[in-house]
Image: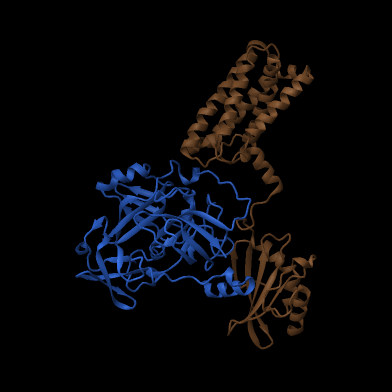
Amino acid sequence: MPVDVEARRRLTAALLGAEAALPPDQLTDRAARGRLIGVSEQTLHLATPAGEESFPFTGTTSFWRGGDAAPNELHPGDDVVLRYAADGSRVAEQVWAQMARVTGVISSSHEETVQVDIGHDRPSATVVIPYRVSGRMRVRHPVLEPGYLFDAIGVWRDGEVHAVLPATTQPPYSVRQAPRRPLAYERRSQVSGMVSWYDPALGHATDVNPLARLVGAAYPALDSASDCGDGCERRQSCLPLPLMSLGTTFSLRNDYTGDTAVLPIVACGAASAHFCDRCAAGAPGERGRLAQLTLLSFVGLGGTPTAGCFNATMRVG
Amino acid sequence: MLDILREIQLPIVALVLLLGAIAKLTDPAVRGLANLLPPRLHRPSTLVHGGIEAVLAVALLVLVGYPGDIARAWAALLFAGGVAALFGLRRRDPEMGCGCFGGLSTAPIGWRTITRAALFAGAAAAALGLETSGLGVLGDFTTWHGAAVAIEVVLLAALSPELKEFALSLYHRDSCDVREVPLRRTLSRLWTSDVWHLNTAMVVGREPVDVWRQGCWRFLRYPGRRGERPVDIVFGVPIDGRHSVVRAAITDVETGARLAILGEVAADIRRFRPREGVGAGAAGVSTVRAYRSESV
């Protein structure tokens, strides 16, 4: 049965007060996403649900398409996500095309291809590790065998994810061997850790697919009695994450940029509970992952998708 | 005095080995050093490790002379090997506990744990060459032995993160916002609350149409009728149920307006905190009465 998240927030606020269920931010003033129609002189033309939208860019705007790229290397039809300049204008400051990411537990591997279980509520993902990046991948993912963790940034090519760079250092043991984490005895008003990102739209039809613009987070500590449900294999996170449900909102601050937003929980992020790593981008933070933000939320909160993570602080109403 | 210090190492090391053996042989979870081995060897290696510790503990207590020295040398080697393994384990996963005393040793391996293992290795080696056994030391126990044991126990306590974990597990429960609680326990708490009994006339059905969680609260939504108007009745059941009270809010389905809010009439009425818009101000009882007068 679909969850009425609006009713949940309304009723939570009715019972505990408005501050317990803050309305989520939309982040439309910080980032945009759509399908590329074309690139003209200093302007990107994207197909979005609002029709064709134009986004000017400058000479300092950075472009990525499997690596640093020039504007004219982007192809019509590409899935494009961009962040606006910090001055509040709609000028694109950073642009990423065909971004992909696969995070989860390896279920099988064969030659250049790895099958990854990315969560009980999502179809498994296939990643191609091209020969030219296999060395870079092997350094931080030495064991591509079932049961071992996998997290890589990639690019969509012909409907497949081609790995470009690793997003973490793989632990040297399988998930079955992972240590049990100690429980938290003290209640904390806020929790710090790293956040990563995922693409709920899987790069498909991002001009019309509402998942492409979904704002929120997949959360690794959903209440097993309600939303995590059957088949949930959520393991104990190494962070003391409060148990929550779909629709619950929380405030998240990017500890590096100071950007803050209220985000709703939109999916189960059980796969990220396996990871007990630190974000290599920026100053060292706490071990463990708070949440997987949707790609648009991650970019809107100041994250760089190619870095894969940022340190953040979460506060629940 | 030096001989007394050497002698007390025998019963102390034997006791430590015995406690470690009991923890390893009775705890089915895979912990600590076993994680350095392939998965199929986890349980067997834990059992073998526990078995060796038990045998050495008994040997330290009863053997004298050359056989006793062999047992002491093996105990020293076991602890020295443990120091090396702890370094390896810490390098592999800094968050992992040593599992030295089963489920109590879940704190990340730190310098205290490693120092303690090295101290035991030294203690077992210091007992080499003694003419007596562990039981012999206990049989000739003097005040000086007692004082030396007391000092060493204090030292070992300072080097044992397990004591803090033991105290926490004894006196604290895990935080309510991370605690897994079965839904049936929440329902049981709800159905025995005064708030539930006050609302049963309005609630349609006994099973909620939606359940969700936010930290220390679990919410249950029921459809209901208030006169002719359809309403949503949401109950908030605290996970930390010892002191907090069950709450309920009634909202209009069509307008979403909050019609009433009330909390359980708790034994300690001072704990009740009425929310704004309830009508009555300071006392929970008047809130409930006000609601009753509207709904009956």
Left or right: A98 in relation to B117? left
Chain A: drawing colour: blue
Q: Nearer the viewer, residue A70 or B128?
A: A70
* Viewer can see residue B269: yes
Which residue is depicted at the point 33% across and 78% down? A50
Which residue is depicted at the point 55% across and 21% down? B77
Q: Is residue A17 above or below residue A223?
A: below
* Viewer can see residue A229: no
Give the quadrant of residue B23.
top right
Give the quadrant of residue A56.
bottom left
Q: Position of residue B221 (x, y in %)?
A: 62, 73
Q: Position of residue B90 (x, y in %)?
A: 50, 36
Quadrant the C terminus of chain B occupies: bottom right
Left or right: A36 in relation to A13? left
Which residue is depicted at the point 41% across and 45% down? A170
Residue lying at the far bottom of the rendered structure: B228
Which residue is depicted at the point 71% across and 13% down? B132
Residue lying at the far front of the rendered structure: A87
> Quick one: which chain is brown?
B
Give the quadrant of residue A33.
bottom left
